[in-house]
Image (cartoon, helix red, strand yellow):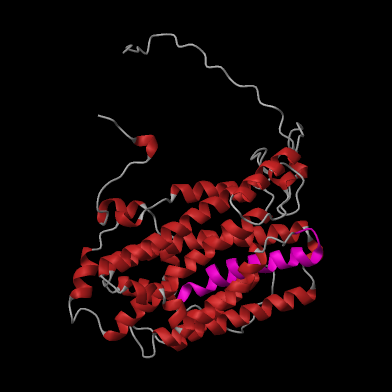
Amino acid sequence: MQTLSFDDDLPSPTVPQLAPRTAETIRAQVAGGILARGEPVQDFDVEQQVSHGSTERVRVEDKRVINGSADVNQLVPFKYRWAWEKYLAGCANHWMPQEINMQRDIELWKNPGGLTDDERLVVKRNLGFFVTADSLAANNIVLGTYRHITAPECRQYLLRQAFEEAIHTHAYQYIVESLGLDEGEIFNAYHEIASIRDKDEFLIPFIETLTNPAFKTGTPEADRALLKSLIVFACIMEGLFFYVGFVQILAMGRQNKMTGSSEQYQYILRDESMHCNFGIDLINTIKLENPHLWTPEFREEIAELMKKGVELEYRYAEDTMPRGVLGLNAPMFKEYLRFIANRRCQQIGLDPLFAKADNPFPWMAEMIDLKKEKNFFETRVTEYQTGGALSWD
């Protein structure tokens, strides 16, 4: 056998000459592959996904968040730098569930007197909602939103967001497994618990709008449908539906209970706050580029959806804590949800919906500002290195 040396000159490989690929040949090849698998061929806009024979460089002025004409495969030149900055921030905030020590949570959960029945209900209801909610969010991104957004910077962040949704689902599974909970009970809760099912059923029509293969933007009606779905997911799902659960588990952590679970929820809250802020920036940019979409009738429709979201999340609060627990009670959440709804409305240019709604949980702002470095020295199981810092010694 010949021994290779890194000092040897290797012959240059023969590079096959490829025939030019036009949009038509790509469409035919993709469709052929689909037919070979026995799947139905769906119409798709290959010109949007492939630089259809054009060799022109991308111009910033051709970029738009929706219905853009620029090649979506060329990230630069940047037009929406705010989206790129959020992508970089998401990467800097990267974490993994197994970094967090769950030993104290396990001991507390297994101790018959460690938690009250009401506290245990809060934990299980929380997990029952979140284990599927983040999967719904990921489906909405990768099967729907991503293909309708034509700004590469925004698409780059959406890919990061989808990965973070997978991490969150991983985190909930890690908690369920660590505590030895009934996986079927937790993961099927959205079918069995009415307050969870009602929230998911509220969201599903908006997912189906964007994931429908026949749905395309380009008309005022379709563009409003996209904008409505983006508002529902950024402002109601990630910006409202998650907050009862966040407050409940983080309140436990503040009382030195379920500290490992609480720390994971802190990281998830930080991620979801970024998702919500990105979604709001996306919504406002679409409004700026398409002011004709933001009609009085459309604004009224969004306001009604926000009110419905508050109603559904309050029912969930009542279901998860039928009695006062952890110094919390359902009426406190009514005030909190109205406060959050007002804030979300103002962030997208709507008038507040509820008069004199105050924040009964000001400490939540501290949780959102969590710095990752805290975990390195206090609760991490082991250190880990990213690829750029690996050593082979």
Q: Quadrant of the N terminus?
A: top left
Numbered circles on residues, count: 0
Q: Is residue 222 magenta?
A: yes
Q: Is residue 229 above or below residue 79?
A: below
Q: Is residue 357 visible?
A: no
Query: Can you give x and y, in whole percent of width and height, for residue 322 in the image?
Result: 39, 90
| Segment tinted magenta in the rendering | 217-244
Q: Is residue 237 above or below residue 286?
A: below
Query: Can you give x and y, in whole percent of width and height, for residue 267 in the image?
Result: 40, 60
The residue nearer to you, when weighing 24 against 190, is 24
Q: Quadrant of residue 43?
A: bottom right
Q: Residue at x 29, y 73 (%)?
A: 181
172 relative position to 150: left or right: left
Q: Residue at x 40, y 59 (%)?
A: 370
Q: Residue at x 42, y 65 (%)?
A: 366
290 relative position to 144: left or right: right
Q: Quadrant of the C terminus?
A: top left
Q: Is residue 146 magenta?
A: no
Q: Is residue 36 above or below residue 133?
A: above
Query: Can you give x and y, in whole percent of width and height, for residue 347 in the image?
Result: 63, 67
Q: Is residue 135 visible?
A: yes
**What secondary structure characterizes most of the magenta part?**
helix
Query: Can you give x and y, in whole percent of width and height, for residue 309 in the image?
Result: 58, 79
